[in-house]
Image (tube, grey):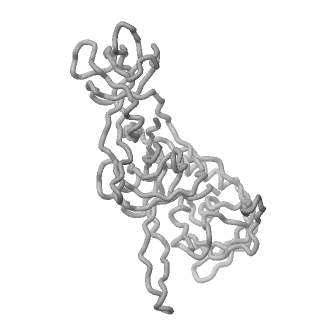
Amino acid sequence: MRKILITTIALAVLLFSGLLMSAPESKADILKVEGAEFYTVVKGDTLWHIAGRFMEDPFKWPSVWKWNPYIRNPHLIYPGDVIKVTKDGMELVKRAAEPPVVKLSEEPVVVLEEVRPPAPLVKTYSEQNLSIWGVISKKDLDSAGTIAAAGNGAVLIHEGLDIYISFKDKDEVSVGDKFSVFTRGESVSHPDNGKFLGFMTERIGSIIVTDVSDAADTVTAKVLTSTSEIYKGARLLPYEELPAEIAITESVEGIEGMIVKSLGGQVLSGEKEAIFIDKGSEDGLVTGNLLQIYRERASVTDPLNTSSSLILPVEDLGVLLITDVKENLSLGVIIRSNKDIATGDLVRTMGPLK
């Protein structure tokens, strides 16, 4: 199970800075009009490159990119598109007259005239042990083993101590197998419909199996590591190394979801804090996906036509990096926040990194 969070995105910014330095300079004209710059997209441009060029920070584009409700699928840009850049952000204001397409069967498929940048690496937030947090489904929890007792009868279990562990199917366990020790935290339910989504978990150590005897119902193991007190009843799952860094991974699905809980239970969350969302692997989400965090604004009456309403742009709140994924619940860390983020705020994958 991956349980990883971020300390900083400095490494990613440095990687993208190098990418920007090596990217070919666009030969397209930049039109300046009353505090705004109108930039025409050329082949090889990406939103990351454009944000780095005009905003001096390629990671800024999800925070400053404005969705024009009259343009379908604003995640994608094409040569000939016109982007308006002001101090407040970037907006796609004109589509190319003839974006390139090719027909496969009955559905037209857009051929992107862009170069995908390499996936940047983001270091985990191990200094505060936030990487030990994760989520678990009821199915995985039901299959997890448990610590039955300490070998010497002690209440508090520590590193180097022999312990006895129990599994539903002892025959699947062998000498030398390693397991992560974790405790189950609060359950997570959907704030709208009350549907149960999973449990919060905290990884507190690791063990290794030393004996599997046919003469006993339990398995003998030794505690390898512990980050906090371990007691009888702590649960076990197959061991996975906590990675030192995580690669941003392109989302292959257009996923929209909701923030259902913060890791610490606080009402409002900000940068470097962890939150849970109501989407997971069943929806196509994977570790490393980036999601925009946003809030919808209420529509307003059109002053020129009072019988109709105007759809206002969404309020951009920040960017979320997914760090641990289960079937219908995922944990992520906020890598950029523009303002306070709350339960009920919305998230959506930001499209290909182009």
Q: Is residue 318 visible?
A: no
Residue 54, by quadrant, is: bottom right
**Image coordinates for residue 329, horizontal then vertical, percent:** 43, 47
Q: Residue furthest top?
A: 215
Q: Nearer the viewer, residue 104 or 320?
A: 104
**Image coordinates for residue 314, horizontal then vertical, percent:** 47, 70
Residue drawn at the location 69% of the way across and 61% of the way down: 45
* Residue 263 position (above or below residue 337): above
User: Which quarter of the image is occupied by the C terminus?
Assistant: bottom right
Q: Is residue 130 left or right of residue 80?
A: left
Q: Is residue 327 left or right of residue 31?
A: left
Residue drawn at the location 41% of the way across and 39% of the way down: 131
Across the whole image, how many numbered discs are drawn on residues? 0
**Image coordinates for residue 228, horizontal then vertical, percent:** 30, 30
Q: Nearer the viewer, residue 205 or 213?
A: 213
* Residue 108 position (above or below residue 210): below
Q: Is residue 2 visible?
A: yes
Residue drawn at the location 46% of the way across and 51% of the way down: 279
**Image coordinates for residue 179, horizontal then vertical, percent:** 42, 24
Residue 352, by quadrant, is: bottom right
Q: Is residue 230 left or right of residue 143?
A: left
* Residue 123 position (above or below residue 352): above
Q: Nearer the viewer, residue 86 or 224?
A: 224
Residue 80, by quadrant, is: bottom right
Q: Nearer the viewer, residue 288 or 84?
A: 288
